[in-house]
Image: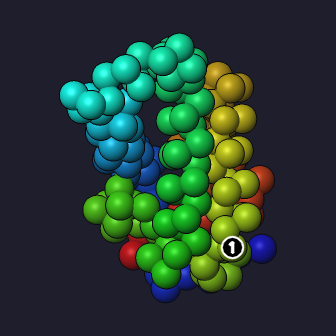
């Protein structure tokens, strides 16, 4: 089934990588503030053993925050995260429609599969006619230029 978009111009892998970099810089900056927040009155609270921040915990938090942020933005009227907006691309459904939150969340969680299989799910974007990665195919989504 062919996607119906304004120009049917699918976003290139390079635009998507730049959008990913922008988004991850924003997410990392926000999470650094949270994890390294150190107010004088809260020193004892932060040193409580339950809140010792290990790399695994930070990685899990980063995954959850990134998946929810990107899904919420892609399901919004913008149809794109801040990185995608900066790169003039958006995520659409099969007919150019906005994704449902559940569909956008599935797409973002499925990025783990694209990554886990030696990034083949991402490499597919370069060779696919519609520039779909494995995670896009799983969620029936397209990334198009605006």
How many discs appear?
Answer: 1
- The image shows residue 71 at horizontal and vertical percentages of 58, 60
Picture coordinates of residue 94, whole percent (x, y): 70, 75
Q: Residue furthest left?
A: 40
Which is more toward the observer, 30 or 5?
Answer: 30
Q: Which residue is mark 1?
A: 100
Q: Quadrant of residue 20?
A: top left
Residue 144 in sight in this render: no
At 69% from the left and 73% from the top, the residue drawn is 100
Q: What residue is drawn where x is 71% and y is 26%?
A: 117
Instruction: Say above or below: 92 vs 116.
Output: below
Q: Give residue 101's quadrant in the image.
A: bottom right
For residue 109, above or below residue 96 = above
Looking at the image, residue 91 sits to the left or right of residue 93; the answer is left
- Tell me the quarter of the image containing the C terminus: bottom left
- Residue drawn 72% across and 54% down? 106
Give 5 or 40, whichever is nearer the viewer: 40
- Residue lying at 37% horizontally and 48% vertically, measured from the top left: 23
Looking at the image, can residue 59 be seen?
Answer: yes
Quadrant location of residue 134? top right
Q: Is residue 134 above or below residue 41?
A: below
Q: Residues within 10 Å of mark 1 (few under 14, many from 20)?
A: some
Q: How far from the left and from the top, in percent, is residue 69?
A: 50, 56
Which secondary structure, mark 1? loop
Position of the N terminus, as image quadrant, is bottom right
Give the side of residue 19 with respect to residue 41, left or right: right
Residue 64 coordinates in the image, percent (x, y): 59, 42
Q: Nearer the viewer, residue 89 or 85?
A: 85
């Amino acid at each position: 089934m062919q996607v119906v978009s304004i120009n049917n111009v699918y976003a290139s892998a390079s635009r998507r990588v730049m959008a990913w970099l922008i988004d991850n810089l924003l997410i990392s900056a926000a999470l650094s503030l949270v994890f390294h927040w150190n107010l004088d009155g809260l020193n004892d609270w932060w040193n409580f053993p339950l809140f010792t921040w290990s790399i695994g915990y930070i990685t899990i938090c980063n995954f959850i925050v990134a998946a929810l942020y990107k899904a919420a933005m892609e399901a919004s009227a913008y149809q794109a995260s801040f990185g995608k907006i900066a790169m003039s691309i958006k995520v659409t459904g099969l007919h150019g429609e906005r994704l449902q939150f559940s569909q956008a969340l599935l797409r973002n969680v499925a990025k783990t599969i694209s990554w886990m299989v030696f990034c083949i799910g991402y490499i597919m974007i370069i060779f696919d006619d519609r520039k779909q990665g494995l995670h896009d195919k799983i969620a029936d989504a397209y990334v198009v230029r605006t």
